[in-house]
Amino acid sequence: MNLMKVEPSRRDALALAGLAGLAALLAPRMSFADVAAVDAEIKKLYGDKKFESGKIRLDVPEIAENGLVVPVNVDVESPMTDADYVKAVHVFADGNPLPGIVSYKFTPACGKAAASTRMRLAQTQNIVCIAEMSNGSLYSTKANVKVTIGGCGG
Amino acid sequence: MATTPTPRVRVPTQAKPGELIEIKTLISHEMESGQRKDASGKIVPRKIINTFVATFNGKMVFEAEWNPAISANPYQSFFYKASESGELVFTWKDDDGSNYTSKHKLTVA
């Protein structure tokens, strides 16, 4: 059998353009952040610095039935003295319309680098948590949350 | 919900020196994310509490920057290591410029 050389005709090109337009129309009305958006946010804060693992305990439910109120509890291991403490903790989501969730600033007066709040999640996604120590070292961790009912008006 | 946001805070009034106390706060606020559309299809403008600050005798202890992903009626808990008697002041900063504060005396003995 002879293999036909396929050249895109004008008609094909038009059909493709039409398909692309249709896809754009069918796309969800909300655009969601992704892993790249979270990386960009982290880069904005800390540039290309390396992250170590450990020290952070990120406590989120494995399955969230209601995406409108998902508890998020962060606890970073640190002596919290004037010489060695946790300066900042940032929490991001890679499947929400906006990547940021919360940013904490801790001081040695806290005694413990732990905080809890409640967040909205639009869909099943990863929660990324990074911590900055007073000596400049950085730590990161992530956890996946399965969301059964999304919580961003969708 | 058009009522004034009312803060609710649970903090002990007395502590021993060096004691680690947990502070739990909750404020009523709709936390309009700016992502939602109303019945006519227009986007409801964002109106959230963007910052929560805790100070002790005027010195910053803890700060949380909230994004639209924080749930309505935002809850925030954190810790404070009691060292001396004084006043804990919590401030919530709204997008519209208003501040809501809550003050608590702490006796350390």
Image (cartoon, grey):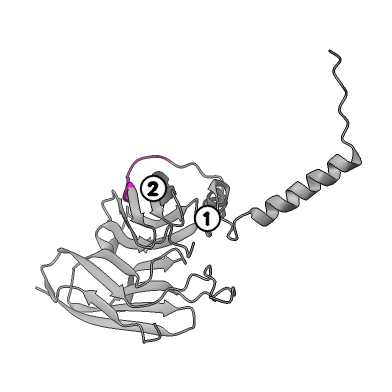
Q: Tag on residue A45?
A: 1
Mark 1, chain letter? A
Residue closest to the far right: A10
Q: Position of residue A18 (x, y in %)?
A: 78, 49
Q: Position of residue B14 (x, y in %)?
A: 11, 74
User: Which amino acid lies under the numbered mark 2 shown in the image of this protein?
Assistant: Lys
Image quarter hosting the C terminus of chain B: bottom left
Q: Is residue A144 left or right of residue B76?
A: right
Which residue is pictured at 32% across the width and 73% down the height?
A: B54
Residue underneath mark 2: A146
Residue closest to the eye, A140 or A29: A29
**Residue B4 falls in image quadrant:** bottom left
| Up-down relation of residue B3 to residue A130 (above or below) | below
Residue B82 among magenta residues: no
**Residue B105 falls in image quadrant:** bottom left
Q: Is residue B108 left or right of residue A77?
A: left
Start and end of the magenta stretch? A52-62
Residue closest to the eye, A58 or A138: A58
